[in-house]
Image (cartoon, rainbow, N blue to C red):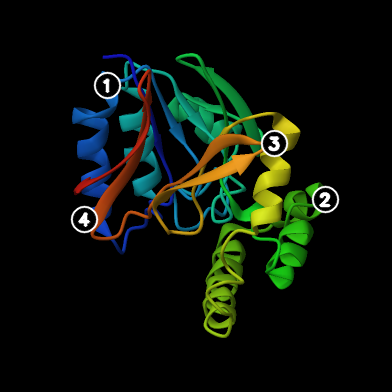
Amino acid sequence: MSRTLFIADLHLCQEEPAITAGFLRFLAREAPHCDALYILGDLFEAWIGDDDPNPLHHQVAAALKALPVPVYFIHGNRDFLLGRRFARASGLTLLPEEQVLERYGQRLLIMHGDTLCTDDQGYQRFRAKVHQRWLQTLFLALPLFIRKRIAVRMRADSKQANQHKSVSIMDVNQAAVEAAMTRQKTPLLIHGHTHRPAIHPLTLMGQPAQRAVLGAWHTRGSMIQLDADGVRLIDFDL
């Protein structure tokens, strides 16, 4: 059966070996039987540079490289510094933050999803700052041990800040969703980031449309399957 698979928000790290093991099983058993695999950001919990010798990164790169199908990657808010060196090692094709696809007679838009959370103005200001090219170049030029310290501090600050935010602020803004889909002329949007898996029906320009949201990989895996019959959200054991 012809199908394309989408995943996001695995947040792989050495502290969660069960999730890594589940992902490797997914790559060995499920991913080879599709036309393409799209990873929509936050594959890793943190990324401080392609020169990080973390053995987890090498393990994941080798497993991705071994896949007999093309794999595409959109950066998330956790791994936006993932670069060409890792992409070459893993066989990933890096995509822009918004990508329009044509699959099985359907036109769709894919993204990580954090740019849709426009009600969280504090996060959007932070995102704009850390996506400045000169700042990224400066950060990546720092010694690895300093980058690690900065990353630990930033994750702690982010966790503390999110504790004081309402649930609605950290979700997508409906107007932002509709604006993105209208701009790209797509009746289907697939994204991650919010960790709220669901398929939401909506009306766009008087026509039925859908927003499909991937779940995070915590105790179970989450993927979206797109084929000639449409889009389907699937959760599975790790």
Q: Are marks 3 and 2 in contact (CB under 8 Å)?
A: no
Neighbourhood count class around disc 2 (C-alpha, 10 Å): few under 14, some 14–19, many 20 upward = few
For numbered disc 4, what is the local secondary structure?
Answer: helix
Q: Amino acid at mark 2?
A: Trp
| Residue 35, picture quadrant | top left
Q: Which residue is outermost to the front?
A: 206
Q: CA distance from mark 2 to mark 1?
A: 38 Å
Instruction: Residue at 50%, 14% (x, y): give it.
Output: 105
On the image, the x and y values in percent for residue 185 come to 69, 28
Q: Which residue is mark 2?
A: 134
For numbered disc 3, what is the local secondary structure?
Answer: loop
| Precedes in sequence: disc 2 or disc 4 | 4
Q: Which residue is mark 3?
A: 205
**Which residue occupies the foreground of this view, 114 or 130?**
114
For numbered disc 2, what is the local secondary structure?
Answer: helix
Up the image or down, 230 lies above or below 210; here it is above
Q: Are marks 2 and 4 in contact (CB under 8 Å)?
A: no
Q: CA distance from mark 1 to mark 4?
A: 21 Å
Up the image or down, 35 lies above or below 209; here it is above
Q: Amino acid at mark 4?
A: Ala
Which quarter of the rendering shows the N terminus? top left
| Precedes in sequence: disc 1 or disc 3 | 1
**Which residue occupies the foreground of this view, 99 or 79?**
99
For numbered disc 1, what is the local secondary structure?
Answer: helix
- Residue 198 seen in the current view: yes
Q: CA distance from mark 2 to mark 4?
A: 37 Å
